[in-house]
Image: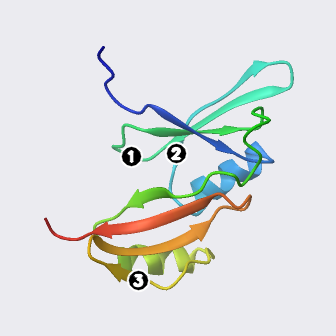
Amino acid sequence: MNINRIDIVSIPVSDQQAAKSFYQDKLGFHVIADVPMGPEQQWVQLGLEGANTSLALVTWFDQMPPGSVQGLVLDTDNIKEAHEALTTKGLTLTDIESAPWGQFSMFNDPDGNGWVLQQAAAR
C-alpha cells in the first residue's frame, strides 16, 4: 500500500461563502475551487501557498455538524508576528502559551471549529 499524504481535510460549516471569506480574509487561504458539485451543493476548496494539504468547506456530512472539528494546527515560523497580524484582522486568539514542544495560541472559526496556531520549538 502506498499512501502519499493527507490531501484534503473537511471542515464542517454552516455557510460555505461566509466561511470562505473568513479563511481568505483572516487566515490568508486562497481558493483552489469553488464549483457546483450537484443539486444545491458547492465544492469549496481552499489552500495555503506552498502547502500540500487543503481544506474543503463542507455542509453535507450529517455526522459532522458545523463547529465539530477541533485541534486543527496551523504552523508558523513567528507566532508573535502571526498572532499580532491575526488580531489586527479582528480574530480573537488566546494568549500565546509555551509548552515543551513550542508555543501556541488557539482560536475558532465563525462556526466554532477549533484551531491551534503553533510555532514549534527549535529541533
- Residue situated in front as seen by the camera: 1 or 104: 1
Q: Name the residue under label 1.
A: 49
- Closer to the N terminus: mark 1 or mark 2? 2
The reply to whether discs 3 and 2 touch (Cβ–Cβ < 8 Å) is no
Kind of residue sitting beneath label 3: Glu
Task: Give the structural element (helix, strand or loop) at label 3.
Answer: strand
**Which quarter of the rendering shows the N terminus?**
top left
Disc 1 from disc 2: Cα separation: 8 Å
Q: In which quarter of the image is residue 39?
A: top right
Task: Give the structural element (helix, strand or loop) at label 1.
Answer: loop
Kind of residue sitting beneath label 1: Glu
Q: Mark 3 points at which residue?
A: 97
Q: Which residue is most to the top?
A: 1
Task: Give the structural element (helix, strand or loop) at label 2.
Answer: strand
Q: Which scheme is used to colour this image of the protein?
A: rainbow
Q: Quadrant of residue 22?
A: bottom right
Which class describes the residues within 10 Å of circle 1: few (<14), some (14-19), or many (20+)? few
The reply to whether discs 1 and 2 touch (Cβ–Cβ < 8 Å) is yes
Disc 3 from disc 2: Cα separation: 28 Å
Seen at 80% across and 47% down, the residue is 15
Which class describes the residues within 10 Å of circle 2: few (<14), some (14-19), or many (20+)? some
Disc 3 from disc 1: Cα separation: 26 Å
- Residue situated in front as seen by the camera: 29 or 113: 113
The reply to whether discs 3 and 1 touch (Cβ–Cβ < 8 Å) is no
Kind of residue sitting beneath label 2: His
**Which quarter of the rendering shows the C terminus?**
bottom left
Q: Name the residue under label 2.
A: 30
Which class describes the residues within 10 Å of circle 3: few (<14), some (14-19), or many (20+)? few
Seen at 36% across and 37% down, the residue is 52
Horizontal and vertical percent for residue 19?
70, 51
- Residue situated in front as seen by the camera: 92 or 66: 66
